[in-house]
Image (cartoon, rainbow, N blue to C red):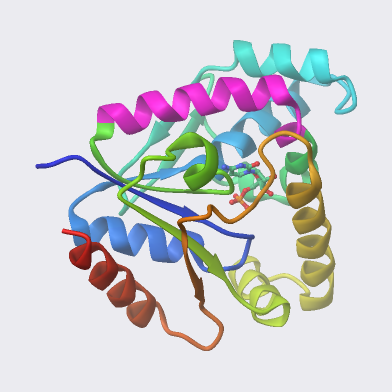
Amino acid sequence: APRCVVAVDGPSGSGKSTVSRRLARALDARYLDTGAMYRGVTWAVLRSGVALADAAAVAKVAEAARLESGTDPDAPTMTVDGVAVDAPIRGPEVTAAVSAVAAVPAVRRLLVARQRDLIAAAGRVVVEGRDIGTVVAPDAALKVYLTASPAERARRRSAEDAADEAATAADLARRDTADSTRAADPLQQAADAVVLDTTGLGIDEVVAELRALLAARG
Ligand code: C5P
């Protein structure tokens, strides 16, 4: 199958994960969740007991951690040092700490390099994250930037996590600010990204729109 990289960026709750997995399935491609990699490193950092503010120590933990990303869109998995961390990396402790870990430049350098290797090995792959179109895969065949209104994003996230909507909205706002204002590879739209506001749109509509865009590009 020909190589094809689709970059899907956007803030959390924009529908990135659901849309990316569905698109990968439709394209018979692999799926790479780069957020899971940052969460996996964060899990290792919390387990190690090093202080989040100690960037050098955080970077050391990241370098030592053995990450394995399962890229099946039907069942993506994340393993760190042989431990399946799919549940704990979605928990409140990791979610509260991940933006701090993801802001450490050495951690980003390391994970961006691994992501490029995984993308090269996969060939056909839908990659979701914050900096895929801008940093990780600037030559992607299609770059998508998904957004949704803050209220819609909080509603989706709290439904997923069975969490309180107000608390979720506050957490999303905090991570958005941290992710967009950090010095290293902040969340931003690539100049050549297609911006899609998914507020009020169903998953099928979004996936169909992206497939049409890809088809139009040959
Ligand atoms: O997408 P998800 O919410 O799982 O990402 C968790 C966190 O990982 C984000 O809030 C962000 O701090 C970081 N991240 C990143 N760059 C990426 C993907 C995720 O900085 N490409």
Q: Quadrant of residue 153?
A: bottom right
User: Which residue shows up at 34% across the image and 40% down it?
Assistant: 71
Question: Outermost residue toward the front?
Answer: 191
User: Which residue shows up at 66% across the image and 38% down it?
Assistant: 185
**Image: 114 above or below 28:** above
Count of marks, rendered view:
0
Q: Is residue 211 magenta?
A: no
User: Which residue shows up at 77% across the image and 54% down it?
Assistant: 175
Q: Going by the image, does 119 lie left or right of 98?
A: left
Question: Outermost residue toward the left?
Answer: 1
Q: Going by the image, does 88 lie left or right of 104?
A: left
**Image: 115 above or below 196:** above
Q: Quadrant of residue 89?
A: top right
Q: Please tell me whether the stretch drawn in magenta is mainly helix, strand or loop.
A: helix
Question: Outermost residue toward the bottom?
Answer: 200
Q: Quadrant of the C terminus?
A: bottom left
Q: Which residues are magenta?
A: 101-121
Q: Nearer the viewer, residue 132 or 216?
A: 216
**Image: 131 above or below 67:** below
Q: Quadrant of the N terminus?
A: top left
Q: Nearer the viewer, residue 50 or 23?
A: 23
**Residue 122 horizontal/vertical position (percent):** 26, 34
Q: Going by the image, does 51 lie left or right of 4?
A: right
**Residue 75 horizontal/vertical position (percent):** 35, 49
**Residue 191 horizontal/vertical position (percent):** 52, 55
Q: Nearer the viewer, residue 1 or 57?
A: 1
Q: Is residue 103 magenta?
A: yes
User: Which residue shows up at 58% across the image and 59% down it?
Assistant: 10
